[in-house]
Image (tube, helix red, strand yellow):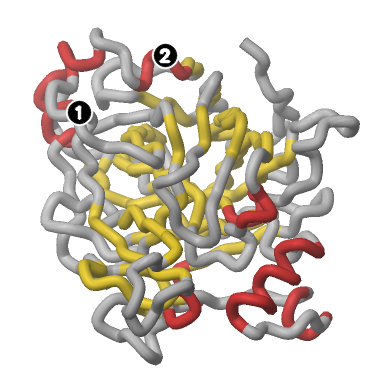
Amino acid sequence: MEQVAVNKSKKETIILLLLSTVFLIVSTYAWFSTNTSVRVNTLDIYVEAGEGLQISLDGLNWKTVIQSNEIIAEALKDTYAAHKNHLPEKMYPASTATHTDSSGYMEMFLGEAVLDDTKGSLTYGEYIITATKMSDERETASGYAAFDLFFKTNSDMDLYVQTDAGVYDIAADDSPNYGKGIENAARIGFVNQGDIPITDPRRDYALAAAAQGLQYTDFSDGRNVTIWEPNFDDHTENAKIDTYNFFGILDTDLIWDNEIFYDGVYANIASPILLNQNNATLYPQYFERIPDSRFFRTEKATRTDLRKTDIILYAGVTKVRVYLWLEGQDYDCQDSASGSDISFVLSFQGENVGTGP
């Protein structure tokens, strides 16, 4: 398995986590689609913990390295029977407004964009969309990846994204798939389910059971959710053209060189609406503007500084649910990006609270 190189920190709080995920043959149709998909030929995940921090898939067996096959291994059910980890065979454009449900999981919606061919309808010949909430159950989930990670540390740590983290186009330069830009629509979500303090007297199985049962359900508005948007500042020329044709967004540096806000889906869209009307202004019953406070963003070009995620791992055990998906409400999730080859690379570093760079 190919592993992404990690530069070890000389500090006591060093690299927390590294995930390398490869999705091949990415296909999208307009913004939402079930007509085409991302076929996942390989899904490699490599997790590494540094000194002072341990990681686990069940809160019981702690280690410094986790491989991708362990995330959905049958053996995991023996120690974490209720886990809902899932890795997709196919990946579809999805959307979320970062709401969490009663189980503490982020609500994800699968959308479908089709051309209305119903003669006599008001939208005949135009693109329309619907959306349906997906289940986070491992047996029925589809279209996106999600899994639980447990962190154990002896001190409070701020979590940082390392400079090599991001989502990348991995197609060969001479490939027809190179440079299509679907990586610009990728998202990574972290749902902090809560923590058990280091002073908790429970040990081993009792502590693991308590950690597994952590569910952050105090808020339904996503305040326990952090969304990472890599590549926020990069857009292909084809994406700009498609966006103008569908939505009338002009190709100006003022728009495309800055953060672009969007409205995530938070309710089923059972009755189709026009594709170019998928926003909270026209349909507040379906869409919601995601507050900037829930985001951190990184540039596509090589970065020289760590980026703080606003996630704190408190001394003890913390449970975090991780989501990987393609955001259908992103302007870069367009027809022109179909057929891309991309790789998700998550590389984190922990620093004692208040002592980071």
- Label of residue 69 in the image: 2
What residue is shown with label 1? 139
Based on the displayed image, in which of its 4 quarters is residue 279 positioned?
bottom left
- Residue 97 appears anywhere in the view: no
Q: Callout 1: few (<14), some (14-19), or many (20+) C-alpha neighbours within 10 Å?
A: few
Q: Name which residue type carries label 1.
A: Glu
Based on the displayed image, in which of its 4 quarters is residue 11 positioned?
top right
Which residue sits furthest bottom?
Answer: 281
From this view, report whether residue 80 is shown above or below residue 333: above
Q: Residue at x 62, y 10 (%)?
A: 1
Horizontal placement of 100 versus 110: left or right?
A: left
Separation of marks 1 and 2 at Cα, in angstroms: 16 Å
From this view, report whether residue 112 is shown above or below residue 34: below
Q: Residue at x 38, y 34 (%)?
A: 151
Where residue 16 appears, x then y in whole percent?
54, 34
Q: Residue at x 24, y 8 (%)?
A: 75
Where residue 275 appears, x then y in whole percent?
45, 73
Horizontal placement of 34 versus 270: left or right?
A: right
Horizontal placement of 212 versus 156: left or right?
A: left
Say which element carries label 1: loop
- Of the two numbered discs 1 and 2 on the same chain, state the one appearing first in sequence: 2
